[in-house]
Image (tube, helix red, strand yellow):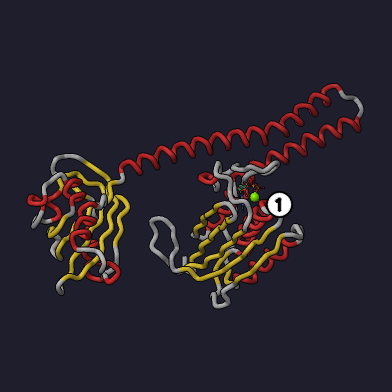
Amino acid sequence: MSNNKKFSPELLTSIWKNLTTAVILLDKNFTLVYVNDSASELLGLGPKRILNQPFDNLFNYHSVDLERIAKYALMDGVDCHQHRADVVFVDSRHAKLAISARRVKLDDEYYILFECRQTDDEIRHDQASNQMHQYQAARNLIRGLAHEIKNPLGGIRGAAQLLQYEVDQQERDQCAELIIEQADRLRELVDRLLGPNQLPQKSHGNIHQTLESVVKLSMLDSNANISLEKDYDPSIPDVFIDQGKIQQVVLNIIRNAQQALVDGGVIKLKTRISHQQRRPGKAPKKALLIQISDNGPGIDSNIKETLFYPMITNKEGGSGLGLSIAQTLIDQHNGYIECDSWPGHTEFNIYLPFVD
Ligand SMILES: Nc1ncnc2c1ncn2[C@@H]1O[C@H](COP(=O)(O)OP(=O)(O)OP(=O)(O)O)[C@@H](O)[C@H]1O
Ligand SMILES: [Mg+2]
């Protein structure tokens, strides 16, 4: 704590007391030994009623995972985070808390330092915002579909009408051809919407060979003002993937970057070993990270939240299926794809587990 030397103990106590985060100190038997003002306010009990009480006595019900905290935080010294714990206080109020637990050592004894934040409003806000995004995505999907279906349908109807009155055999053949063509276009749309219908054919291989084929393919019709920089980690072991499908994913993402870089720019293709596969609800696993980034304008904020939904596009003539197909393919590999973007930078991170 050498950085804090210049602060008086009074000031530090005042900061501690005035934190809006509820702070609770528990001994190794999960008995409360200290609470700050926010904690006693949250619990609805004065410090005297709280101190020396077992943690469980502060609630009528709680879903705080004490077993995990005892095992990981107290025994191993690993910080524990619980994003959502439901609690009912002794005065019957209920709340949703985000909790962090960390082991601290004081006078040769281990304690658990708890930080709690009430998240009811955040959760409500997230739910409302999710609902809104889903609604917008559904509307976009319907609008996009309607548009894609209406064009060929118009063609089919027109050709059928002509066919009704046409006597010239050559004209009739042309009408029939047009109907077949437009029907095929509709079938192709449905197939793309349904997504990849074959299971991946996985084999062991070097990821950089897979990526090199994509680089070659993507450079064929690239704007001369766009450069592609590669930053490969040569120590990456072989991966067990469907080479063709992963190529399709990376190609879809590089194509998007090329289309975004209308005035030119740089696309970077990076590979790394990641120990933090951030798949929600799944334990971290050693994974291959493929990162594709560009220094273009960034993802339009209107579509950011629903980027991977089908038919989300802001391109003239775009079908908005590239990323949705990419996500399906990565899902088939038990992987995870995420996007981070701000003006001047867009990155897609693909995580593929080495072991399924
Ligand atoms: N690198 C990027 N920079 C800026 N915007 C991007 C980038 N990648 C994707 N986007 C945005 O995401 C949208 C959806 O991409 P997606 O690949 O799913 O569909 P699309 O490219 O519009 O159509 P399709 O790929 O089916 O031809 C794009 O329309 C574009 O607005
Ligand atoms: Mg695309």
Image quarter of residue 315: top right
User: Between residues 218 and 77, which one lies in front from this camera angle?
Assistant: 77
Residue 28 in the image: x percent, y percent? 15, 66
Q: Is 97 left or right of 220, judged from the image as shown?
A: left
Q: Is 153 left or right of 87, judged from the image as shown?
A: right
User: Between residues 157 and 288, which one lies in front from this camera angle?
Assistant: 288
Q: Is residue 288 above or below residue 161?
A: below
What is the secondary structure assignment of the residue under circle 1? loop
Q: Is 259 left or right of 102, judged from the image as shown?
A: right
Residue drawn 14% across the image and 73% down it: 107
Residue 283 in the image: x percent, y percent? 38, 62
Image quarter of residue 23: bottom left
Residue 183 in the image: x percent, y percent? 72, 37
Image quarter of residue 198: bottom right
Q: Which residue is mark 1?
A: 262
Q: Is residue 105 above or below residue 83?
A: below
Residue drawn 71% across the image and 31% down it: 153
Q: Is 354 left or right of 101, judged from the image as shown?
A: right
